[in-house]
């Protein structure tokens, strides 16, 4: 008993699992079916039209043949039957044979089947076809007086017309409807009755034998594939639009490059363009609002500064001077924030092609470092540049300037007094790499991704800052198809910022980030550039060491 | 010295006016382009401090008019526009200097003084610093009164650094302006000239900023950081 129960339970569990699996599979299939598709809609619509046309054609043919039947109505066929019956009245056997032959001729029976039957080799299929044909073809009854001398088949009911020569619809004893016409001989008592099945009769027969459904079931699968293929081909412009929209960078708001000539796509493409334009305008408005505000802030900041400085020059009380000093420092911070905001708005704004040029990154960095050295010197920080030689990049000068300024400014600011800020340049595999190392407190690893966010500041930050510096750096680097990441210098504490930019004339095809997805102009072909802008002449042939040839600094070796 | 200050902001204009007056300058402060034009007609100024964004027009218009009539009146632009093209437009338009707001008062005063010197035709042939004297006319250099023999390159290097005292001059700039063959020379040619120069004039003047350039500091540094770097090949 227990064994039985256990077994039943086991089977039940198995059945449950199978049912669940089946349900899952069904669910997946259903999701495939339920997920709407335009191509499927079109194919289904095409197939529906096909089925509808086939049905209408069928209905029309059936209706026509049920309303009028030329064979039954043809007087000459009736007369031929009467003639044969009368002339062979004396020879019943030959008479029957002749009627049978004529009957078959009228039904236009397939000869090979007739032959097979004559030879007694009729197959089951033949029998079935015959029945179907018998049900659809005109049938014949020949009377001589009240004697039936010929009947097409046993299934033909013995119907009589009310009068000769009239086409009537009559109902057989089994309820089937027939179209019947009888002709009477003028010389004798011979009567010939021809009858065809009625409409409903035909429908039933055709349905029974699958004449309607079978062709559809066979042909539809063959038609679906080409239909689906043609729909896919026809929908290609659609995919082009969607591909272009999908491949856009987040800040690429330029109008679509794909210009559709198709009536259906044009409004969509135009709507997308209009939307993009509106977004662009609103972004521009917002940007110019911030830029204007930042710009307008400069004059009052200058006024505060000038007045406090004038006051400080006159003040003699050291406490007053200290207070004014902190006023000035706050003023400086605000001024810096304003100028960073402006830089950020500018580096985000779209730059036209002519703002870009081939620049020597080394020269630009050297220029900026020479200016920033004053600040470093003031803070007791040593600044150093290590570079193997000119590094041509295709870039927008002002953006790069603000990038370098922010990087080095940060490094100086967070360095301890007596510390070193080392800027290194190197090139490899078509990319110029810029390393800015400081000996400050560094940034904890988990915050590395977040410090590039605007206004993000490390929680345990002692230095004053806006939190915009690295956001500017990131924005500039991205505009130039480069990368920026944070790490720690080889030894000791501090922060290393690594910026990679594609070198001019190289790496643009190699670097994965070289896709111009965000609308910045692609660099011109190197061949078109002036000779001086091309690959740098090997002027620093002697030791590839940095300028400070005397420096025994091991850090002078190119970083990893 | 009589200065025309064109600045529409009340507080800033007042602040600058007071600061310049404290320095013994006579300041005429106007807040509109039209007032500036009439006051320029009525007075003779030694210098114009010009704001660009004014309520009744752009300061560059006035600059253009000034340059057509009075070619040598020094003009210093004070503007909140800090972009490169703005600065270039101002300087190409005839301004002698361009200062971006907000600025330090000390910087404004130093630039005003520099402009005044230049406009008075006062040529500083003689550059001196802590016992070092350089005469551009005679191309002679003395250290603590003792004559020092310098090559052409060494003299040009020293003169350039002295003129830009307190600011780092980049290697690129030095190579372009001083070396006979320009920057296509060997990498350490500059270092060789510099080490020769240092040997001749002595320690404590030229400071190396490694990889970036050289600077002669205006004030005496406590520890001479450059002494360790003097041994360049």
Image (cartoon, rainbow, N blue to C red):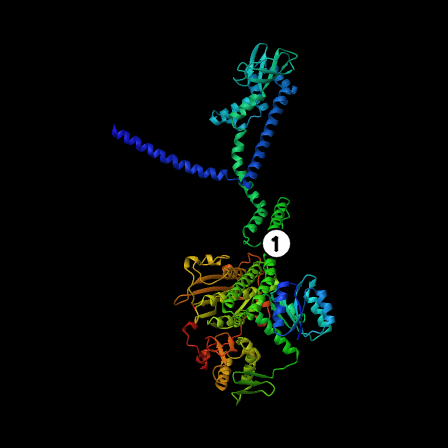
Total numbered labels: 1
Chain of the residue where label 1 is placed in the rendered structure: A
Q: Mark 1 = which residue?
A: A285
Q: Residue furthest top?
A: A146
**Quadrant in which the N terminus of chain B appears:** bottom right
With respect to residue A507, does A246 lie above or below?
above
* In the rendered image, the vertical position of residue B164 relative to residue A88, given as above or below: below
On screen, residue A489 versus residue A509, left or right, reads: left
Alpha-carbon neighbours of circle 1 within 10 Å: few (<14), some, or many (≥20)? few
Q: Nearer the viewer, residue B116 or A97?
A: B116
Quarter of the image for residue A525 reads bottom right
Residue B79 visible within the image = no
Q: Nearer the viewer, residue A239 or B201?
A: B201
Mark 1: secondary structure: helix
Residue placed at 61% from the left, 27% from the top? A60
Residue B226 in percent (x, y) is at: 46, 79
Q: Position of residue B201 (x, y in %)?
A: 50, 85
Q: Residue A138, image x and y in percent?
A: 58, 21
Expressed as whole percent of the image width and height from the top left, the position of residue B199 reads 48, 85
Residue at image x 64%, y 44%?
A263
Foreground: A68 or A248? Answer: A248
């Amino acid at each position: 008993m227990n064994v039985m129960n256990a077994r039943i339970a086991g089977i039940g569990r198995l059945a449950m699992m199978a049912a669940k699996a089946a349900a899952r599979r069904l669910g997946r299939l259903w999701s495939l079916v339920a997920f709407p598709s335009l191509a499927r809609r079109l194919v289904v619509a095409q197939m529906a039209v096909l089925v509808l046309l086939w049905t209408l054609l069928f209905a029309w043919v059936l209706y026509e043949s049920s309303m009028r039947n030329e064979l039954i109505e043809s007087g000459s066929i009736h007369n031929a039957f009467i003639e044969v019956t009368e002339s062979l009245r004396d020879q019943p056997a030959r008479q029957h044979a002749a009627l049978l032959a004529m009957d078959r001729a009228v039904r236009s029976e397939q000869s090979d089947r007739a032959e097979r039957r004559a030879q007694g080799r009729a197959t089951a299929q033949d029998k079935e076809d015959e029945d179907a044909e018998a049900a659809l073809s005109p049938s014949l009854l020949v009377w001589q007086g009240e004697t039936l001398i010929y009947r097409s088949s046993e299934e033909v009911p013995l119907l009589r017309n009310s009068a000769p020569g009239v086409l009537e619809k009559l109902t057989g004893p089994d309820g089937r409807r027939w179209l019947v016409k009888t002709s009477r001989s003028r010389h004798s008592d011979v009567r010939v009755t021809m009858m065809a099945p009625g409409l409903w009769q035909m429908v039933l027969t055709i349905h029974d034998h699958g004449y309607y459904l079978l062709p559809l079931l066979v042909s539809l699968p063959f038609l679906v594939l080409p239909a689906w293929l043609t729909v896919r081909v026809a929908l290609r412009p659609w995919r082009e639009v969607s591909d272009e929209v999908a491949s856009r960078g987040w800040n690429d708001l330029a109008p679509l490059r794909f210009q559709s000539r198709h009536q259906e796509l044009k409004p969509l493409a135009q709507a997308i363009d209009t939307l993009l334009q509106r977004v662009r305008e609103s972004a521009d408005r917002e940007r110019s609002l911030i830029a204007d505000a930042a710009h307008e802030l400069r004059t009052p900041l200058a006024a505060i500064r000038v007045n406090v400085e004038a006051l400080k020059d006159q003040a003699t009380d050291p406490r007053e001077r200290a207070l004014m000093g902190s006023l000035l420092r706050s003023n400086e911070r605000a001024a810096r924030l304003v100028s960073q905001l402006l830089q950020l708005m500018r580096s985000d704004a779209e730059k036209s092609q002519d703002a870009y040029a081939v620049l020597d990154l080394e020269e630009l960095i050297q220029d900026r470092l020479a200016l920033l050295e004053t600040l470093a010197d003031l803070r007791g920080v040593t600044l150093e540049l290590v570079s193997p030689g000119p590094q041509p990049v295709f870039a927008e000068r002002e953006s790069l300037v603000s990038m370098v300024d922010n990087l080095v400014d940060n490094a100086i600011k967070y360095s301890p007094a007596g510390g070193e800020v080392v800027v290194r340049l190197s090139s490899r595999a078509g990319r110029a790499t810029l390393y800015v190392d400081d000996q400050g407190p560094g940034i904890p690893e988990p915050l590395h991704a977040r410090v590039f966010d605007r206004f993000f500041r490390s929680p345990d930050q002692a230095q004053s800052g806006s939190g915009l510096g690295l956001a500017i750096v990131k924005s500039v680097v991205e505009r130039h198809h480069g990368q920026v990441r944070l790490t720690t210098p080889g030894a000791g504490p501090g922060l290393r910022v690594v910026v990679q930019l594609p070198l001019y004339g190289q790496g643009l095809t190699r670097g994965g980030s070289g896709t111009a997805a965000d609308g910045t102009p692609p660099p011109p072909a190197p061949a078109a550039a002036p000779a001086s802008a091309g690959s740098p002449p090997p002027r620093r042939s002697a030791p590839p060491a940095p300028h400070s040839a005397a420096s025994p600094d091991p850090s002078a070796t190119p970083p990893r | 010295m009589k200065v025309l200050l064109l600045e529409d902001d009340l507080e800033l204009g007042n602040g600058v006016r007071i600061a310049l007056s404290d320095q013994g300058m006579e300041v005429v402060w106007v807040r509109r382009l039209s007032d500036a034009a009439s006051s320029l007609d009525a007075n003779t100024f030694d210098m114009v401090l010009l704001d660009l964004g004014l309520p009744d027009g752009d300061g560059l218009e006035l600059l253009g008019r000034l340059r057509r009539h009075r070619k040598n009146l020094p003009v210093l632009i004070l503007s909140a526009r800090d972009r490169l093209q703005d600065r270039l437009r101002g300087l190409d338009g005839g301004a002698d200097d361009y200062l971006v707001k907000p600025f330090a008062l000390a910087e404004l005063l130093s630039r005003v003084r520099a402009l005044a010197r230049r406009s008075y035709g006062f040529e500083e042939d003689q550059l001196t610093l802590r016992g070092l004297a350089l005469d551009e006319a005679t191309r002679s250099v003395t250290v603590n009164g003792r004559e020092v023999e310098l090559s052409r390159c060494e003299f040009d290097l020293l003169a350039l650094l002295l003129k830009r005292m307190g600011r780092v001059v980049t290697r690129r700039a030095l190579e372009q302006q001083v070396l006979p063959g320009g920057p296509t020379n060997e990498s350490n040619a500059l270092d060789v000239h510099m080490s020769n120069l240092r040997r001749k004039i002595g320690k404590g003047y030229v400071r190396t900023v490694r990889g970036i350039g050289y600077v002669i500091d205006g004030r005496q540094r406590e520890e001479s950081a450059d002494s360790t770097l003097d041994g360049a090949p």
